[in-house]
Image (cartoon, grey):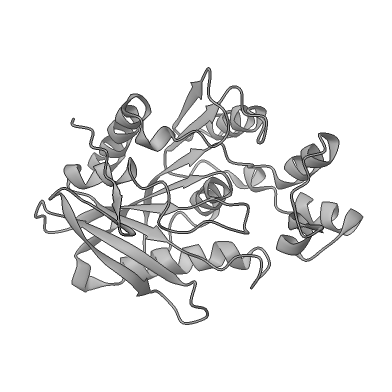
Amino acid sequence: MEFKDYQLVDGKYDLLGDGTCIYDIAYKTDSSKNTLDLYLPSIKKEKYPVVVFIHGGGFVGSDKGRHLTGILNCLQDGYAVASINYRLNDEVVYPSIVYDCVDAISFLASQDEYHLDKDKILLWGETHGGFIASSIGIQYHTTEVYKLAGVISFYAPIDLYAYHKYQIDTNQVMKINDVILDEKSFGKQGDELLNLLKTYDVLSLIDGAQPPFYLLHGKKDTSVPIEYSYRFADALKEKGVPCTLDIVEDGTHGIDFYACEKYNTPIRTFINTVFEE
């Protein structure tokens, strides 16, 4: 299993002959943000399993072009890769952010021209993108349009209520221009915000029907406590959902695990396994 370091050249990835990309596909028309990039492998298959990457950024930033170096290695295994943009908190409040991503997945599953396998879709996200991927994997893993084969989640703030409290207790409340990001993202303030966040307890919705999960978290992450991934793994296992928990002893928040062969190889093995089932 070869690991390649795909590099950005003039804003586009050099795929080293392993695939081609169709950029800025509109999956709906609500916003200019509702676009995705679709990477198709050079390997020819009747149907391509799809790895869908959902970027992080606290619901306020980042975009579909980040962190793809390691993820694009999936092209070598004959899988398509889609990286999606979604509306951020300058346009919508949660949960519209999640619904955008569900719409993007549904769009991909319904496009016959790309020869994608709608029953073999895997989500991969980091930080808040990991939360989105996990939330979809828990609540919307099977629809009339698609079926998820698995979810990869890097250091997700899976408990939104606990995460907001943690920010307050550690003086790490995220702000832009003195505006608290969670207040902007969820449209509430103070106790109303806390009460709302309690209702988004996705771990309580795990019922055993979910696809396998691969969780990764750095033990020295001070931005998103590692305890969240421990709780997440326990909640999955309690309901009999297959789960791999990869703890990186010296890992901190935001380290580029994607572009490191040591972490990339077991993840690709996980992807191969769930796509072969």
> Quarter-wise, where is residue 184 in the image?
bottom right
Choose between 155 and 22: the one closer to the eye: 22
Identify the residue shown where x is 78% and y is 45%.
173
Whether residue 144 is visible? no
Identify the residue shown where x is 56% and y is 44%.
127
Choose between 252 and 161: the one closer to the eye: 252
Q: Pick out the residue farthest to the right.
A: 191
Give percent across and percent down for residue 134. Answer: 53, 47
Q: Pick out the residue farthest to the top.
A: 249
Q: Pick out the residue farthest to the front.
A: 10
Identify the residue shown where x is 60% and y is 27%.
230
Identify the residue shown where x is 84% and y is 51%.
194
Give percent across and percent down for residue 243. Answer: 46, 31
Q: Give the left or right position of residue 170, taking residue 147 as reference.
A: right
Give percent across and percent down for residue 55. Answer: 49, 52
Q: Give the left or right position of residue 246, taking residue 238 as reference.
A: left
Q: Is residue 124 above or below residue 88?
A: above
